[in-house]
Image (spheres, grey):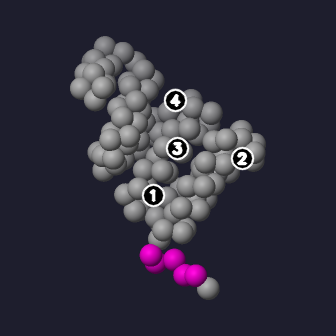
Amino acid sequence: ALPVLEASLALSRRYFDNETTLLAQSKLAGCLFDLWRDDEALPLYRESYAGLVAVSGVSSETILEGSSLASTLVNVQRFDEAKSFIRDELLPAARRSLGPDHDTTLRITMCQAEALMNNPESTRG
């Protein structure tokens, strides 16, 4: 699937609009994430999240993309960045747009907990 998604992104960049390209980029990032190639997925998620926010504003699609970005930040052990992104931007938007009991909001909260729990620099007392 990876070569097909890479080709799709290349074609999207050449022939289609920005939003189509961002979605192709997001799919490629998701494939890399599933293959545990988080260092390669991270810049793609960053770019697609920022682009989707610029194009669509806060929507369920951008919140879901932000959730993927947050999970990737935790996986590459950028705990401080993940915590501030989730706390300051992503979780408030998810609670406002989706509600506190929505599946995506709960997954973001769980990701925040992972960032707090797995950070070796966090204090426990």
Question: Which residue position holds label 1?
Answer: 74
In the shown orientation, is residue 71 left or right of residue 124?
A: left
Mark 4 vs mark 1: give the one in front. 1
Q: Nearer the viewer, residue 92 or 107?
A: 107
Sequence order check, earlier mark of 1 and 2: 1
Question: Which residue position holds label 4?
Answer: 55
Mark 1 vs mark 2: give the one in front. 1
Question: Which residue position holds label 3?
Answer: 66
Q: What is the magenta range?
A: 120-124
Give the distance between the C-alpha atoms of the residues marked 3 and 2, in whole angstroms.
13 Å
Residue type at mark 3 is Gly
Identified at 30% across, 46% down, the residue is 37
**Are the residues at dot 4 and dot 1 in contact (C-beta closer than 8 Å)?**
no
Q: Main secondary structure of the magenta part?
A: loop
Question: Which residue position holds label 2?
Answer: 95
In the shown orientation, is residue 71 left or right of residue 40?
A: right
Residue type at mark 4 is Val
Residue type at mark 1 is Val
Judged from the image, the secondary structure of the residue bearing numbered disc 2 is helix
Identified at 28% across, 17% down, the residue is 11
Sequence order check, earlier mark of 4 and 1: 4
